Image (spheres, grey):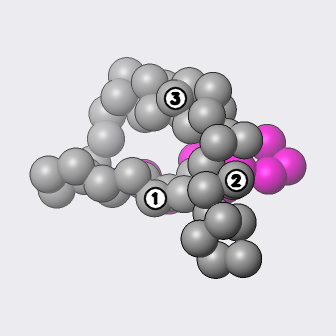
Amino acid sequence: MHVEKDRCEAKFWLRPEVRVAYNDGYDARALRLLHSIVEANRERIERAWHEHFG
């Protein structure tokens, strides 16, 4: 899962648990917030991915 805003970018792995794979520009506070959002919506994100890509 990729997250981009302005000149910042982060990538999260969703399995086996949500974790940061890559971060370029987000400070620790923003990264923690993003992590919690991704974690709270992991199933929804995965479902949308499967619906789109099959």
Q: Which residues are magenta?
A: 13-23
Q: Which of the two discs, 2 and 3, labels the residue nearer the N terminus?
A: 3
Could you say where residue 47 lies in the image, as x and y percent from the top left? 70, 53
Look at 16% across and 56% down and name the residue there. 7
Badge 2 vs badge 3, beta-carbon distance below 8 Å: no
Q: Nearer the viewer, mark 2 or mark 1?
A: 2
Q: Judging from the image, what secondary structure is the residue with disc 1 in? A: strand
Would residue 23 appear left or right of 18 to someone viewing this image?
left
The residue identified by callout 1 is: 2
Would residue 34 appear left or right of 43 to someone viewing this image?
left
Q: Which of the two discs, 2 and 1, labels the residue nearer the N terminus?
A: 1
Neighbourhood count class around disc 2 (C-alpha, 10 Å): few under 14, some 14–19, many 20 upward? few
Neighbourhood count class around disc 1 (C-alpha, 10 Å): few under 14, some 14–19, many 20 upward? few
The residue identified by callout 3 is: 37
- The amino acid marked with disc number 1 is His
Q: Could you say which is closer to the camera, residue 35 or residue 27?
A: 35
Return the mark for residue 13.
none
Neighbourhood count class around disc 3 (C-alpha, 10 Å): few under 14, some 14–19, many 20 upward? few
Could you say where residue 21 lies in the image, as x and y percent from the top left? 59, 57
Could you say where residue 48 lies in the image, as x and y percent from the top left? 61, 56
Could you say where residue 1 lies in the image, as x and y percent from the top left? 54, 57
Tell me: residue 44, above or below residue 48: above
- The amino acid marked with disc number 3 is Ile
The residue identified by callout 2 is: 47
- The amino acid marked with disc number 2 is Arg
Would residue 19 appear left or right of 5 to someone viewing this image?
right
Q: Residue furthest bottom?
A: 53
Query: Does the segment drawn in magenta span residue 14?
Result: yes
Identify the image quadrant of residue 54: bottom right
Q: CA distance from mark 2 to mark 3?
A: 16 Å
Q: Nearer the viewer, mark 2 or mark 3?
A: 2
